Image (cartoon, helix red, strand yellow):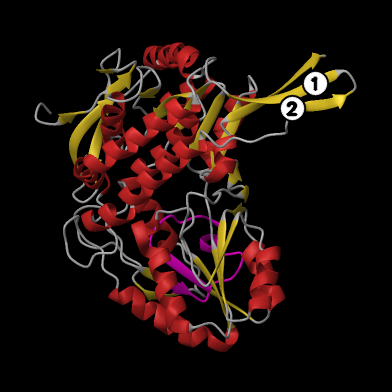
Amino acid sequence: MSDLRALRNYINGEFVDAADGRTLEVVDPTTGEVYATSPLSGEADVDAAMAAAAEAFTTWRDTTPSARQLALLKVADAIEARAEELIDAECRNTGKPRELTRSEEIPPMVDQIRFFAGAARMLEGKSAGEYMEGLTSYVRREPVGVCAQVAPWNYPMMMAVWKFAPAIAAGNTVVLKPSDTTPASTVLLAEIMGEILPKGVFNVICGDRETGRMMVEHKTPAMASITGSVRAGMQVAGSAAKDLKRVHLELGGKAPVVVFEDADIPAAVEGISVAGFFNAGQDCTAATRVLVHADIHDEFVAALAKAAAETKTGGIDEEDVLYGPLNNANQLKQVSGFIERLPEHAKVEAGGKQVGDRGYFFAPTVVSGLLQDDEIIQNEVFGPVITVQKFTDEAQAVAYANGVDYALASSVWTKDHARAMRMSKVLDFGCVWINTHIPLAAEMPHGGFKKSGYGKDLSGYGFEDYTRIKHVMTAI
């Protein structure tokens, strides 16, 4: 174990081990082998991080928007300058293809930080005025305080940005916990940011689910924010309710992809296969649940199966690879279990099995012949698996699309503008894409309804989630 890389917590501007010395093993998912350790943080570590964030908040909240903007712009510049180090850490920890990580993750991360840097100076509200005779009112928008944040393992770097950037831009301080399986790039982000931000403004503690629970239940944070599973979100909401903390939840998804008979089939197949298999399907907005009009169903399924067969999974530096392994052994077991439990009426059109005998790779998979109540339709697989259902008319498409507990993202594929507008109105999802699937812009909100959670990431709406509103009235 002595030759393993030892990751450490970042608390109050210093890298430290867990107070009691406990550690977790960090596994390379391309091999299944342990390559590092990280702290298994306990109560003393959570206390220390929260105390540092609380102390830093007393001064950070009073910094001017321009000062916070400048700090975040410097963070964005530093991430660009050290991009290769971050890519190395992220790829080793997740198995993602290096070139795609370089092109698809670093640029949006930097862009999102710069967006929130600008948002710090753009808060708006009602003008001061006399809304009652003899009394002047105005509204203050203030930071909420210390934010306890838990990031997921599917996009460790980018989800860390989605958490800390709006919080810090608004004048809050942060204690962030990365997933226990993917702490490496977040610890490196702490090193980069520590050279720019005052100590205590950004703290990282590593650990497991119990560490996250202690963070959420700690008396110091004013807000808890998590990106994760529905189960985790429910636990956080329940824990936060004990002392009425604000809660921001971005949870699971089961995105319907509605393909009408007039759709451009080659374009739809290409867009959907990429949006379904990218990042091994480990994306809450992934194009996982395709609904196809009966008139083009067979043609579409054949084309999608062909696209899946031509899609390649492989190692970090292999050529022409769209995605790497699943994140961990438990995730491989979960995805495999869905395929093993398929009902008799389902048909595996492509893939459906593990690839190789080393690491957690799973083949691009297409499953047809499914019914609305089937387990694989109703529950999130979070793997490179695209299901296909057949519908006969618009009403049935809407019923199938909305007939799940998730409500994060969706897409419609049609040349009929009126139909696209009707569908965008009735689809019960936080995002509706038309003739595309998965692009995100920093200026636009990301977040769902129902069991996909509440609160928004990105955009001015996401920024406002990290502020509170105070009414001030004075006699004149």
Identify the secondary structure beneath mark 2. Answer: loop
Between residue 100 and residue 83, name the one nearer to us.
83
| Mark 2 and mark 1: Cα distance apart in space | 7 Å
The residue pinned by badge 2 equals: 128
Mark 1: amino acid: Thr
Please give the name of the residue rendered at 24% of the width and 64% of the height, measured from the top-left corner: 321
**Which region shows up in magenta?**
366-388
Please give the name of the residue rendered at 48% of the width and 65% of the height, measured from the top-left corner: 437
Classify 132 as above or below 274. above
Q: Position of residue 81 (x, y in %)?
A: 22, 41
Between residue 349 and residue 191, name the one nearer to us.
191
The residue pinned by badge 1 equals: 136
Please give the name of the residue rendered at 58% of the width and 48% of the height, measured from the top-left corner: 452
Q: Position of residue 450 (x, y in %)?
A: 65, 48
Crowd band around label 1 with a 10 angstrom C-alpha radius: few (<14), some (14–19), many (20+): some
Asked where in the image residue 243 lies, by quadrant, the reply is top right
Q: Where's the N terminus, which quadrant? A: top left
Q: Where's the C terminus, which quadrant? A: top right
Name of the residue lying farthest toward the front: 476
Asked where in the image residue 37 lies, by quadrant, the reply is top left
Identify the secondary structure beneath mark 1. Answer: strand
Q: Position of residue 139 (x, y in %)?
A: 70, 26
Between residue 354 and residue 29, name the one nearer to us.
29
Classify 121 as above or below 343. above
User: Where residue 205 is drawn, which disc sits there?
Assistant: none
Between residue 314 and residue 474, name the one nearer to us.
474
Q: Is residue 384 magenta?
A: yes
